[in-house]
Amino acid sequence: MTSTTKHISPQPGDGRMTLRVQLILLQALIVAVVTLIAGLTAGIIQAHTVRDAYEDRMLAVAQSIASMPVIHDAFDDADPSSTIQPLAETIRKASDLTYVVVANADGIRYSHPHPERIGEPVSTDPSVPLSGRIFMGTETGTLGTSWRVKVPIFDGADVIGTVSVGILESQGDGEFAANLAWIIGAMLAAAVLGMLGSAWATSVIRRRIHRLEPHEITALVRNQETTLHGLSEGVISVDAHGRITLVNDAAARLLGRERDEIADAAAEDVLGPELLAVLRDGEDAGRPVIVGDRVLVARSTGAHDGTASVEATLLLRDHTELHDVVRRVEEADAIIAFRRRAGLPKGLSAETLERVSTALAAHPDSSASELGTVLSISRVSARRYLEHLASTGRALRSLDYSTRGRPGTRYRVTESLVTESLAIPGAASSPAVRD
C-alpha cells in the first residue's frame, strides 16, 4: 500500500500562525524569561557582593586604626587631632574611602576629611560603638548618605572613643552600575544565542515531523485511526523488544481479546505459538493458523534482521467462512457427482482406476503427487484418476493451506469407495503411501 502526504501550507491572510513561528516565539519567550530571571538574580548577587566587599574593607580599616598604639597615646595629648588627623587621612586615601573619623567618648571629632569639622560632635548616633559593639549600616551624615562601619576604641576594658569609616552610597552604586553593564551585556548575548538555538531546534523538530503543520498532523492521525480501525484485516505491530505497539479492532476481534488489554502487552503473552512463529520467522505468502474456532491466514514481515531484533507487523485475515463454503461446495459436488456417475471418460483405465481407488481407501488424505509416487505413475495421471473419483462421488477434495503459495488439494475416500475397496481381494496389501 502506498501512502502519500499532501502538504498544505497556510495561505496569507487566513489568520493561521505556522508551526515554525509558534515554536520560535514560544522558545524566545522562554529564553527571555529565563535570561531576565538569571540577570536579576546576578544583579542582586552582585549588589550584595559589592556592599559586602566594601563593608569587609571598612571593618578591617576601622579595627586596625582602633588598635594602633599611636591612636591610644594621642588621646592623652593636649591636641589629639594634630596626631590623629594626618594618620587618618593617609589611611583614608590609601584605602579609597570617603571618610575616616576618630572621635572621643563624648563624640567630639579628632579627624575628618574636612578639617574645619574637627572639634565638632559627630552627626550620627555613636551609642552602638560606645557600648562596645560594632555597627554596620547606612546613615546620612554631613557628607551625604553612606555605607559605614563604627568600632569602639578600648583602653583596657573601657571605651575611650570610636572610629567611623564610610563610603558614599553613590560610589558603591556607581561600581555596581559598572558591573551591571557587563551583566546586561551577558544577558543580551545569552538572549541572542538562545534565539539562534531556538531557530535551530525549530528546524530540527520540523524536519522530524516532515514539515507538517499542526492541523495537518491532526488530520493525518485521524485518517490513520479511521483507516486502521476500519480494516477487516487484523493489524498488529511489535517493537524490537517484543511488545505490541499497535493493534486495530479487527485483530482484537480475531484473537477474541479486548484491544486495551492487548496494547503494550508482550507478544508472547497474547499470540499463540503458531502466530508467534509466523511473526518471528516472517511469512509473505500467508500461513493458515487455527485460533479458537477461526481459520486465519497470517502474514508477517519478520521480527529478525540477521541476528538483530527489529520491528515487525503481523497481518491476520479471517478465512473461516471461505473454508466452510469450500467444504460445503465440495460435499455438494460429491453428492451430485455420485448421483450422475457414468462410465469411464476417454483415456482412463479401469485397472489403474481400481489401483488408485484401493490405495486411496487405504491411505486417505493423500495428494496426487503422493499417490503417483507410490503407484509409479505421474502426478498428472494420478490427479486425473483422483478427480474422476471426486466427480463421481467416490472421493472428496479438501484444500491444504500448509503449502507455500497456492493451497494444495488432498483427497479422501467416501463411504461407498471404502465399501468397494473392502470387497476387492488384496486391497489391504496395496503399497503404503509415504508422506
Image: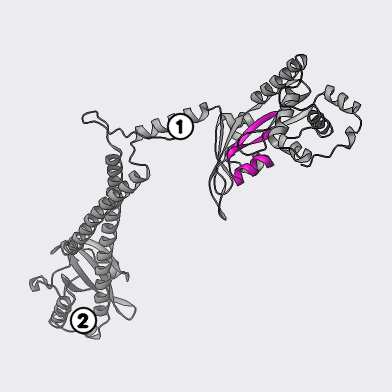
Callouts 2 and 1 close, C-beta under 8 Å: no
**Foreground of the two, 389 or 40:** 389
Residue 106 can be seen, yes or no:
no
Residue 245 can be seen, yes or no:
yes
Q: Secondary structure at mark 2?
A: loop
**Foreground of the two, 345 or 384:** 345
First in sequence: mark 2 or mark 1?
2
What residue is drawn where x is 66% and y is 38%? 403
Eye-nearest disc, 2 or 1: 1
Disc 2 and disc 1: Cα gap in Å?
Answer: 96 Å
Query: Quick check: 346 left or right of 165?
Result: right
Using the image, determine if residue 417 lies above or below residue 108: above
| Residue 123, x across and y down, in percent | 17, 64
Using the image, determine if residue 183 lies above or below residue 295: below
Q: How many marks?
A: 2
**Residue 209 lies in quadrant:** top left
Task: Identify the residue position indicated by label 1 in the image.
Answer: 224
Q: Amino acid at mark 1?
A: Gln
**Residue 12 lies in quadrant:** top left
| Residue 126, x across and y down, in percent | 24, 66
Query: Quick check: 324 left or right of 282?
Result: right
Label 2 packing within 10 angstroms: few (<14), some (14-19), many (20+): some
Q: Amino acid at mark 2?
A: Phe
In which quadrant of the rendered image does the C terminus lie?
top right
**Residue 145 lies in quadrant:** bottom left
Label 1 packing within 10 angstroms: few (<14), some (14-19), many (20+): few
Outermost residue to the left? 116
| Residue 323, x across and y down, in percent | 67, 26
What residue is drawn where x is 34% and y is 78%? 157
Q: Secondary structure at mark 1?
A: helix
The magenta span reads 272-299
Task: Identify the residue position indicated by label 2 in the image.
Answer: 75
